[in-house]
Amino acid sequence: MNRPFRYRQLNQLILAHFREITREPGVLFWGIIFPILMSLGLGIAFTKKADVFRDVAWVQAENSQAGSSGSALGTFLLTHQVKRVHDKNGAVCYRIILPDDKLGNTTFNIRMMDWPKAMVLLKRGNLTMILGEKDGKIEYHFDPLNPDAQLIYLKLSSLFENPSLMQRSANPDIRPLTIAGTRYIDFLVPGLIAMGVMMSIMWGISYEIIDNRSKKLLRRMVATPMKKSHYLIALITVRIGMNFVESGLLFLFTWLAFGIKVQGSVPALITIFMAGNIAFAGIAILMSSHTAKTEIGNGLINLVSMPMMVLSGIFFSYHNFPEWSQSIIQAFPLTMLADGVRSVFIEGAGFAEITIPSLILTSTGIVFFLAGLKIFRWH
Amino acid sequence: MTPSDPVIEVRNVFKSFKTVQAVRGIDLRIYPGQFVALLGPNGAGKTTLVEMIEGIQKPDRGDILILGKRWKGNEDELRKVIGLSLQETRFIDKLTVKETVTLFASFFDLDNSRTDEIIYLVGLEEKRKSYVVNLSGGQRQRLALGIALLNDPKILLLDEPTTGLDPNARREIWAILQKLKDRSQTSMILTTHYMEEAEKLCERIVIIDQGKILKEGTLDELVGAENQDQKENSGRIPVHNLDDLFTQLTGRHLHE
């Protein structure tokens, strides 16, 4: 009798996959502990103001000295009684501290050196800014595309124009936003949940299938009356179930540690989350449909997941990328999932906002799944 | 189908992979209860022939009948009567022996008592709670054989079941198969390049090389016929065993 569902088979396959996952200590670490550690690390890094220390090279013009009338920077350092200290190597440097109660203090260590030495330190990444002088004016030598150097330039140029900044401890211009949904951690957690879904499904399904094919377990299983669909259904079911647990624990932790809240509809959140799981399950089946080599499997999984991980706005908004690329990035399944989850978490979205992305993600999953089945090799 | 009809019938089968002709016109009939060894060196075409009998490869030409039926349209029915053990199947590492057998038993809709019988049959009672990853090579191969026997198969296909095992582990597998031969009507095809295995377990031996059957028959028929030829052609060396016979037929050794 050819029954469409053989419950005993399906139960046993689900149980086998579940045991396989939960008995592997690595799964607990990479699936549960690692995302929590990542949220903790990034959450702390971006929710506490941190003091900044930067080295700056000062390449003097010939025959000029600190405090000499021929040196603009030297005059500045002398006039404002900038502290002259010795660093741990015994070298002399001038230390300027810009106090700021909102952004954190910034300390500049200005060291005198010749141009070749400054270039060596710049190439090594020890500094990003070289100060020089021409016709009694300070010149800034730096890579304008380097955001850190840009920031140093802005701070130093303001300081040289307005030396009173060294005496200011409170910054009255900044009104910090601390309400839920506006912090970096609020942006980050939905992204981490979306990325967790992608990584867990791509590695948990694709790699599992390729590995089972390479060790001939698939061939051995399909030599029995096992229904092929049941093998895939069991694999996908267990993986999605694990994703609910992993994401739930990440949410629980960030709720306790950072007060993260879901501001929108929870059923809508579950819908977009399921749609994302379906999309990546379909992609995972297609990726693993043919090869029996785990090395090729690694490459395929990375080929799909790495660009999305970098571009889809998991850690930082993709709106910083060029405008022409944004419509492409928005079409990525990970972007759609991250945007959808984020909109429910921090924008208070409901079904009206997530229905279309959920339908697109689900359709993507079904199309990729069917394409994968069409070329699927069981041996 | 009558009891005297072949359970496996291979009719003039050809199979190629890109530029390699793996099987070139093989005819073979295997009858109920018969244990047949396919003997040949690596690359002889044994595994391809077994894969075609198993239904996972389709012949380019020719026909294969299992219990009088073709694979097409009868897959579900035929899968229930075939047992299979491959040279190197690795099961799920973190399942116990009992869980692994139970998983495969569920595919045949078999109950718990059958899983216990099988674990006893292959001598893994003490290892029933051990993870598969912790079993020795011989124990894993016995587990694979037990799973192949779960459904009490009419046809058992064993693809090099003892390759890579030490002599003790090999003898344990042989003992299980010998017991099966004595007690059931299962027909078996065993591919091997160990002539001792073929001689010990199988009443019929088929020697294959380069995708063709070179000779087939019982051990006595094969060795006797060759020695008769040797008498008539006085320059040839007498044949004492299958290795000698293979060398005589091909000019090469089985393990080359």
Image (cartoon, coloured by chain):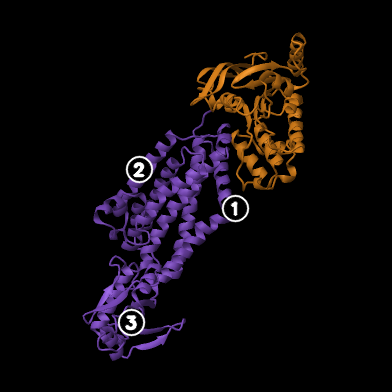
Q: Which is more N-terminal, label 1 or label 3?
A: 1
The amino acid at mark 2 is Ser
Name the residue: 75% across, 8% down: B232
Q: In the depicted view, which residue is nearer to us: A56 or A67?
A: A67
Is A240 left or right of A356, judged from the image as shown? Answer: right
- Residue A160 percent across, percent down from the top left: 26, 82
| Residue B32, image x, y percentages | 68, 19
Closer to the chain start, of discs 2 and 3, is: 3
Disc 1 residue crowd, few under 14, some 14–19, many 20+, Cα 10 Å: some
Location of residue A134 by image quarter: bottom left
Name the colour assigned to chain A in the rendering: purple
- Find residue A95 and report its horizontal and vertical position in percent: 37, 84
- The residue singled out by tag 3 in the image is A100
A149 relative position to A5: left or right: left
Amino acid type at circle 1 is: Arg
Name the mark on residue A23: 1
Above or below B84: residue A285: below
Callout 1 secondary element: loop
Which amino acid does the dot numbered 3 rest on?
Asp
- Check chain identity for marks 3 and 1: say if they share one: yes
Query: Which residue bears the numbered disc 2?
Result: A363
Residue in the picture at 28% in, 80% down: A61
Hue of chain B? orange
Cα separation, mark 1 vs mark 2, equals 33 Å
Specify few, some or many for label 3: CA neighbours under 10 Å numbering under 14, 14-19, or 20 or more. Answer: some
